[in-house]
Each structure stands twice: as structure tokens, then as C-alpha cells.
Amino acid sequence: MRNAGTLWVIAFIMLLLDFYVFQAVRVVTQNLSDRVRMWIHIGYWVFSVLALLALVSFPYVQALQQSKFYRNYIFAILVGLFFAKLIAAVFFLTDDLRRVALWLMSKIFPGTGAQYMSNNEGGIPRSTFLSWLGLGLGSSLFGTLLYGFSNKYNYQVKRIKLNYPNLPASFRGLKLVHISDVHSGSFQHKKAVNHGIDLILQQNPDLILFTGDLVNDRATEMDDYKDVFARLKAPLGVYSTLGNHDYGDYVAWPTPNEKAANLDALKKVHADMGWRLLMNEHVKLERNGEQIALLGIENWGAKGRFPKYGKMNEAHPGTENISFKILMSHDPSHWDAQVRTEYPDIDLMLAGHTHGMQFGIENPYFKWSPVQWMYKQWAGLYEEGKQKLYVNRGFGFIGYPGRVGILPEITVIELV
């Protein structure tokens, strides 16, 4: 019930938006027949009221809280409606400011605004153009979010070659697969996830690296998917780290012991799948007598309230004499905040965390997502001097059960 008050506040804001948007609906339907206009108005309010009821009932109905479908899709639809109406309201507000300015002009300079007055209402009418524009953009956003539901398992294999002069000769041509942010608690389609695993195995990687957020909150979310991810095998091994969601920090656990037990159970999941979980430590990978170092730390975030469990001062010692180093660290903000400034000998850092917000635009010439307002490095490859960072767009999804523009990613990195 702790979040009930917040949801009621959000519901009240949504209701205000509903009334505001309805004014534009009235404008664009004014030339329709009475019967058609009536059914459009009724449909608008029936849909709006059902959305509000779905929102406020969530804290009080246990079945809704346990329903993965409700949490994934209904909440996503509610959020989509909210932002769609919010975007539409921006245009309506622009129109209202225009109307207020014209009204003030008519009062300050009598006669100058007369041509804008409505004979029927005695006031300045709303702009049909801005009403249509606001409704159109809002509807387009909502429709795009609905379309994105179909992309959540549309895995994209991205291949890049990274050139390092200091890479030992035995490791030239090494092919590693990088995945991140599985969020198994959101999955509902085991066959589709298995297809993603097939794509990874088809790359014939020498090494597989996973950079955190295996679950949303609870280790039990992997019960149905442990056998799927246990299929991942590579000659040099499968290595993993923890992300911010893996610690269960976003659950109100009855006791600290239960939270600790959940984390222990998740560590066991990694081991049961044959993954080597790196907890603020490193391993040395060897080929033909030559070595590279693989470091893995716990979650370390420089943004917001994300925790700093990671300890580079424990993972790094012992690698000083290794010429090439890869670091797995879940949160890309770690790169600028500590890695580049304090550990310039880290050649490549692999991260995830942002998901590219699961929403944005990407093409060969342009890349944009709202998440870039918070994260300087949020998707793809970044370089500063001799150091490189690659941010994976995430294998899974959370919150919004879909992808728009930023698709789930399997990264194939070849070291040359």
C-alpha cells in the first residue's frame, strides 16, 4: 500500500490531462454528425476511466500485482497514454497561450483582435490545426509504443573489430560475445529467448561475457530460464558480473537475511549455469603462453542513487604486468567517473545498464534516445585516447515490454 498515495496523485494528474485533451477532441469532432460525435466522446471517456481504474486498483488487488501480463503490458499502456496525452497537451497549451495573447490585445487595443473573435462564443476559438497536430503526435507516440511490443525479442547481432597494438599475438582474432541486461523476470516467451541463445552460439565465440542484471529482483525469476542460458558455452569460458537489479535493492524484503539469501541464490544460479561470476576480482586468460586479464566488478554507478558495490582496488591488483585488460562493469558511468581517471591501463570496458531506454532512433548517420540526457555513454562504442568503452543495448527488457528503434543486442567483438 506504500505506493497507493503516489498512484492516486498520478491518477489525478491523468484525469486533469483527460479533461484538457477532451477539449481538443471536441474541436476536431465539431463538424461530425451528432451521433458520430457522441460515440467518439463516449469512447474517449470510457477508455480514460478504465485506464484510471486500472492504475488505482493495482495496490489493492493482489492478483494484479502477481500478474506478469498486467505489470508488463497494462502498465506500459498506461505510461504510453500518459506521455501521449502530455505531448498533446503541450500543443494545446501553446494554443491557449496564443488565445490569451490575442484576448489581451483585444482588451488593450480595442478592435485589433476583433477578427479573431468567435461569433458563436464571443471569444477566441481554439486552433483546429494545433488540436489536430497535438492529437496526431500524441496518437503517433502511443501507436509507436504499441508497435514496439513486437520488437522485444527481435535480437540484433552487432559486429565490431577493435584494434589494439598492445594485444598479445596469440589473442589476435579473438572473438568475444558481449550480452547484458537479461532481466529474466520480464520474459514470457521461452522459445523466443532460446532463439536469442541460438544466435549467440551461431557466432562461435571464443569467450562470452555478461555484464549484469540477470534478473529484475529475485533469483527465482531464473527458474524457467536457467536451462536456456546454461546452453551458453565457449572455449575460454563464460564470465559474468552483477548489475544494480541483481541485489534485490528494489524489493521490500521482510528481513535483511531474506535479501541476503536471495543474492546467494542468484550467485548459485550463475554457478549452476557454468558461468564464472566475477565479484571484484580478475582472471588471467591464457593462449600459447601469453595472457590477458579479465576484470569483473560488482555494480558501481555514478548516477542517481545507484549503489557503488564495485571495488576496483580489489579487482585490479595482480594485473599490473598484464599488457591487455578487459573490464566488465555494469554501469557505463563508471568509465568516466573512475576507470579513465584512475585506471588508464584498462584497454576495454564492457557495460550495459541503459538499454538505450528501449526507445530512440538509430541509423548509420544518427543516434538518439532520451537516455542520453542522463548518460553520456549509452549505446555502442566510445573511445578516449587508448581506452575504449562498449555499451550493450541489452538482451532483455524491463518496465516497457517492447523496443522502439533501440533493439535487443548481441555484440560480437573481434580483437585485432
Image (cartoon, rainbow, N blue to C red):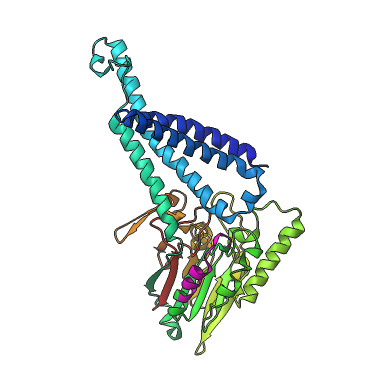
Q: Quick check: 362 left or right of 1?
A: left
Q: Answer above or below: position of 77 versus 105.
A: below
Residue 283 point in image, percent of width and height: 58, 77
Q: Answer above or below: position of 119 versus 363.
A: above
Residue 264 point in image, percent of width and height: 70, 67
The reply to whether residue 378 is in sight is no
- Along the viewing direction, whichever of 243 and 27 lies nearer the viewer: 27
Q: Quadrant of the C terminus?
A: bottom left
- Along the viewing direction, whichever of 128 and 220 lies nearer the viewer: 128
Q: Quick check: 246 left or right of 118?
A: right
Q: Quadrant of the N terminus?
A: top right
The reply to whether residue 109 is in sight is yes
Residue drawn at 23 percent across, 14 percent down: 112
Question: Which corner quadrant of the image does residue 412 belong to?
Answer: bottom left
Taken as a whole, is the magenta stretch helix, strand or loop?
Answer: helix
Does 306 appear in magenta? no
Residue 219 point in image, percent of width and height: 65, 64
- Along the viewing direction, whichever of 266 and 295 lies nearer the viewer: 266
Q: Which residues are magenta?
A: 185-198
